[in-house]
Image: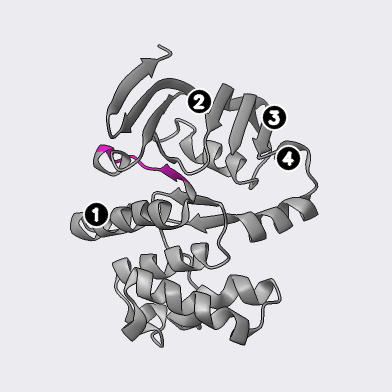
Amino acid sequence: MIRLDRVDKVYAQGKRQIVALKDISLTIQSGEFVAIMGASGSGKSTLLHLIGGLDLPSSGEVWLGNRCTSKMSDRDLTVLRRREIGLVFQFFNLLPTLTAEENITLPLRLAGVSPASANGRVEELLRLVGLQDRRRHRPEELSGGQMQRVAIARALVANPPLLLADEPTGNLDSRTGEEILLLLKQTVELYGHTIVMVTHDPKAAAYGDRIITLKDGAIVEQIWVREGHDSATSSR
């Protein structure tokens, strides 16, 4: 599903060069829930952005299926993200003037899908996230947890194979955060999505099938946690 081959990412800061990622080689299988951990500045969000085609590597290759996204044009990457990648952010990124239902429907409208054709999918997702009775509410009328549920439904509405989540529980209390993590895990079981989630919270990371730890832009540890399978490898 996802493959990174010897990826480096370097940013210029004046005359200095900041190495965000160095020599990252990684494969993520379809239907896997992967959590990426690390301290602030470790490169975890940069890695997520490269996987999602939001940024390009300085060297190396990023593959999504049989396509090398690091060699695609901006236009092709935009189309790819719209059709095949769902994004969930820490601060929800909902449009304040739209209702919950309208925010969920937005990706389909941008793709030219008629409202009538979208109704069935939107209804399904409103039930999944438990917001049928909040469909007409705008973000200011929703709690943080409800806004994140809307954001997850919006990310899923086009049925993308890949879901990227950047600190999805970082702005929520612990109980609500657990509900969001359970919902994410449920989407893997129901729809077979691949999820890559960035988090600083070990409890959140434990919901994944695999935990990847970054330090100073490099992978230092990978832990697989699955039913009947629990192992760890380290690159230290």
The CA span between labels 3 and 4 is 10 Å
Residue type, numbered disc 3? Glu
Secondary element at tag 4:
strand
Span colored in magenta? 195-202
Badge 3 is on which residue?
61
Residue 107 pos. (x, y %): 60, 70
- Tell me where residue 16 appears, x and y as whole percent: 63, 25
Label at residue 178: 1
Name the amino acid type tagged 2. Answer: Gly
Q: CA distance from mark 2 to mark 4?
A: 24 Å
Q: Is residue 184 left or right of residue 113?
A: left
Q: CA distance from mark 4 to mark 1?
A: 34 Å
Q: On screen, 222 above or below 191?
A: above
Q: CA distance from mark 3 to mark 2?
A: 16 Å
Tell me which label, 3 or 1, sits earlier in the chain: 3
Q: Is residue 103 visible?
A: no
Marks 1,2: beta carbons within 8 A:
no
Q: Residue at x 52, y 56 (%)?
A: 87
Is 56 located above or below residue 19 in the figure? below
- In front of the other: 116 or 85: 116
> Going 65% across and 43% down the picture, which residue do you hit?
55
Quarter the N terminus occupies: top right
Of the numbered discs in the image, which one, if any, rests on residue 67? 4
Hey, what amino acid is under mark 1? Glu
Q: Residue at x 62, y 73 (%)?
A: 108
| Residue tagged 2 | 217
**73 sits to left or right of 222:** right
